[in-house]
Image (cartoon, rainbow, N blue to C red):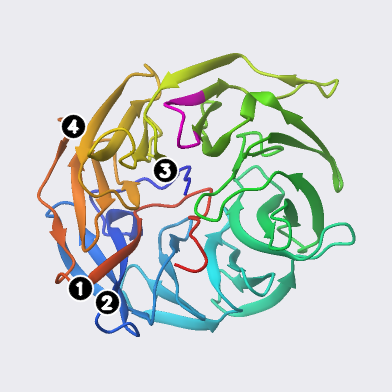
Amino acid sequence: MNMNRTGHPNSNTRDGFSYVYASYVLNDNPTTGYVAVIDPGTDKIIKRLQGGHNPTVMCLSPSGDKLYVVDVSVLYIYSTETFIMLNGVYLGATPVAVYAEPTGKKVYIANYDDGTVTVINGSTNAFIKTVSMDTPDKSNGRPFAFASNKNSRFIYISCLRDDDQSGYVIAMDIDNDALVGLELTPGDQNHNPLTVAPDGKTLITLGPIGYLNYYLSDYDFLYVPTSLLDNTVSGIYLDSKMLFCTLRDERNFLKVLKNLTFDLNGNIVYDKFIELPSYKGQDKIRTSPSQKYVGITVQPTDFPQGGLQIIDTERLSSEFIPLYVVGDMTLFSDTKAYVGEINAVRPINLATATALPAIDMGGDSITVKNIISGYSNQSTARNPYF
């Protein structure tokens, strides 16, 4: 699950970016879930928000004033100033991703089993419409991930067909919701295979075969496969034009490219390509708010423990913090990260590369789902049946 952070915490105000949010469910009461609001100054839970039956993925609005929480069939919208629920909007079958586009005008929810996207008004919090992911040349796809950025005209939506596991991307015009179907190799629903370059015109689609999709004009795109992105899973494209890509389980390095895009003749070009040492079992990838650091969670594959790899994006050096349990993850700041455990959240001191005492969510019979702490240009992806 795959995030390009743009929210900046402000230590002088208690806006939405000043907290860490962790969704969780009660295993002994499977119809009840909550969102824990964690103060990173004290690493204490200061509030628990009702999350419905099974709260999973979340996102913050670009300004940080609203928290969006996806439940089994409802989107809950909270004020991050008062923590009052502003609205609840009914969704389609099996919602798996939520994303607020960079202007804050619209919010999108991917309804996997319906093959639709619910569109919400970001200002009024009201339902706008439900949009099918079928186009004349693309059909029967189930949406599971979003990506965009402030320079993009489109929201990009990754879809996967059940019948042959083939995939495609829908480019949805932010202003009028018009759809364009693009190519994509199969992805998996646990990771977001989409990231958009800072220019807003170059979409990177990751998978066994990676594609570059370039917006030309009107609704015309140029899309070309490239071996540079083969065997990738997810990635983030930083404002510095550095692209970090995670790889499949058996590979112990990351792919890092500088300024991967098209030239005026439609040829794929880049300034630099590096195979950066990492570990097998790469999973979640995030950036700190300043994008100084990239974090990658590592599932235990080669070692008894997994952990968190923190990469300095300027020096391309890294530290590894071993952890016994590795779930979802967020980088709250350049000095602190949070990693989900089964029933707790583990703070990480990035300055000393050490794990701090875990934050107990409230008992042993709990499962932590999603953790966020800032606005992202990509949605969190999850398995639709977990």
Which amino acid type corresponds to the residue marked 2 in the rendered image? Asn
Mark before the other along the chain sequence, 1 or 2: 2
In the image, residue 43 sits, relative to residue 115, either above or below, namely above
Mark before the other along the chain sequence, 4 or 1: 4
Q: For marks 1 and 3, give the CA distance.
A: 25 Å
User: Nearest the camera: 106 or 298?
Assistant: 298
Q: For marks 4 and 1, give the CA distance.
A: 29 Å
Which mark is on residue 331?
none
- Rendered-image quadrant of the C terminus: bottom left
Mark before the other along the chain sequence, 2 or 3: 2
Residues at badges 1 and 2 in contact (C-beta under 8 Å)? yes
What's the magenta region? 247-255
Which mark is on residue 353?
4
Which mark is on residue 283?
3
Mark 3 packing: few (<14 Cα in 10 Å), some, or many (20+)? Answer: many
- Pointer 2: what residue? 27
- Pointer 1: what residue? 365
Mark before the other along the chain sequence, 4 or 3: 3
